Image: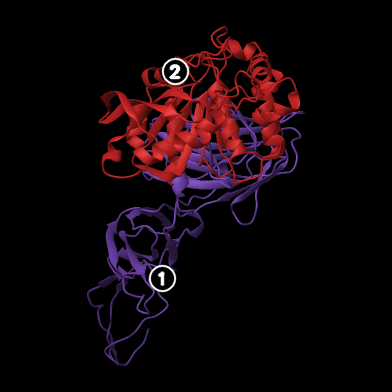
Chain colours: A purple, B red
Amino acid sequence: LKVKETYCTITDLLPNTQYEFWVSALNASGISPPSERAVYVTAPSPPTIKNKKIQSCENAVLVCWESRDINPVDSYTVELSKLTDEENDDIITESIVGIPNCEVLIHLQPTQKYRICVRAQNLGGSSERSEPVLIHTTGTCFYLNEDTAHPLLAILDDGFTISCDELENPECDLPIYDNSFTRCIAILGSLIPFPGKHYWEVEVEEDTEYRTGVAFENTPRHGHLGANNSSWCMRHIITPSRHKYEFLHSGMTPDIRITIPPRRIGILLDYENCKLSFFNADIAQHLHTFNTHFQHYVHPCFALETPGILRIHTGITTPPWTALP
Amino acid sequence: MALKQVSSNKCFEGFQKVFEHDSAELKCKMKFGIYLPPKAETGKCPVLYWLSGLTCTEQNFITKAAFQQAAAEHGLIVVAPDTSPRGCNIEGEDESWDFGTGAGFYVDATEDPWKTNYRMYSYVKDELPKLINANFPTDPERMSIFGHSMGGHGALILALKNPGKYKSVSAFAPICNPIQCQWGKKALGGYLGSDASKWEAYDATQLVKSYSGPRLDILIDQGKDDQFLSAGQLLPDNFIAACTEQKIPVVFRLQQGYDHSYFFIASFINDHIKHHAKYLNA
């Protein structure tokens, strides 16, 4: 760049990149030797928070993001604003600095709204704020793990409805990922990595056969939910005479009859008290409780055995009537 | 309504007591067991009524069911009356173990010589709660009922015939359809006469068909190895079918290896107490 002043502004640099600058002077006799080099690093680009992959509960949130730069940055800073009804909601109430990876677990208060942004940091300074994400700590939220889905299981656009159209060839030639279910037409939700109680609901149709419950990450993908010791589920089958319900773990179920087929199943996962309970949420009726000390955190799991749909509802405050199963 | 305390034993920081009184309904002296949880010392508590089965007195439940710990924990008063009037000197009352003494079937008899004394339905429905509410720290608006076998039948019919009176109902191995089983035909025939249409008013499976009232949430536990189940005396399938048809919420659990005894009751009593506590303490 040729300039006449003793300063120069250089634009259009790439973010998160190291540049070296030197100056030479030029007169009629020629060009001077170059000055010493000045090294600057440009600040990074703001990261992108993975909106669809937020996991949260009443007391915490697990936020992940990705860097927009090719080269690694030094660290990340997460900024939190607790939103109140007042106008002044741009005040940052909490800052977490020095985060080495692209995720962070933050402790929050129940039934509050937060705005969360991430900045990347390097020697050159801090990036602009990322696009914020809004969290409302009403209840436990998880998303569906598409790469665990059986090929015949489709996730609809809202991200929380799964459907299966036909059952032909459950072990057919459709593409199978390493992590997907191969026999059971199933899918896992994201891990619920927070201690305490978690509640969600599954809306079902009377003529759909399904399984729903929880499973460990390592539950066999060629197995059926409830048939092994790494999964627990409620199963609905329709026989010629009636609706049949099973509560499966290690392939075993108690013998239980339920007179009103639930349309909305409430599931309470209580890590602390070692229980997994199922309810007919429409009538607050307790159906069954597994008493198990979960050795690891679990994933919600869902499977369809006949064509139909399941709609999953998250972010629900744990209802009081689940308190005494 | 004078009450005479027969016994008192401290239990889980509350008291298991037995009282005796003169019953106007039954026209004889009647005993009942009452468990008062620790909370009853300082405040009013909801009341859970337990109805025992054939041959029982007020003693069986309070000594064998092991319910006191859960009742203490959840702050519930538990009342367990006797299963029939006693010492009335009615001819034939001691002849069978499934009719007469110890086998009141929770009906109001209309036939002689039973109709004067055998009015267990009215006793449990009206006289006993009135007595309990007048003498103990109860919350009269919060009452629930449960029982075993003949008492399970009693709990179900009392709840179905009195919509809204009980906040919750549950049963262990109940006689669900007495008009169809030997026990029921003998008892209802003896107390109510041979016109079987009069028996329907005391049959849970029949009553469900015309139930209209606040939504119920019925929990039933049944031992799979129960000899009376296989003998066709209990008939839960009929009750379940009727409830399915009428959309009455029931969770019926068939418990592998369990029989008809108090060992079975003791094994699942905590689940039932919690079921009632959910509605009584809401």
Tell me the CA gap for discs 2 and 1.
89 Å
Camera-near label (2 vs 1) is 2
**Residue B17 in the image, given as x and y percentages of width and height:** 32, 26
Q: Residue at x 31, y 69 (%)?
A: A126
Badge 1: residue crowd in 10 Å (few <14, some 14–19, many ≥20) = some
**Residue B269's disc number:** none
Badge number at residue B57: 2
**Residue at figure coordinates x 35%, y 75% from the top left:** A90
Give the chain of mark 1: A
Q: Secondary structure at mark 2?
A: loop
What amino acid is at disc 2?
Thr
Q: In the rendered structure, are the residues bearing label 2 and label 1 in contact, judged by CB atoms less than 8 Å apart?
A: no
Q: Secondary structure at mark 1?
A: loop
The quarter of the rendered structure image containing the C terminus of chain A is top left
Expressed as whole percent of the image width and height from the top left, the position of residue B95 reads 57, 6
Q: Circle 2 marks a residue in which chain? A: B
Quick check: can you spot residue B165? yes
Residue underneath mark 1: A14
In the rendered picture of this protein, how many numbered marks are placed on residues?
2
Indicate the amino acid at tag 1. Answer: Leu
Near mark 2 (Cα within 10 A), the count class, few <14, some 14-19 or many ≥20, is many
Q: Up-down: is A175 above or below B104?
A: below
Q: Which sits in the foreground, A180 or A112?
A: A112
Closest to the observer: B148 or A136?
B148
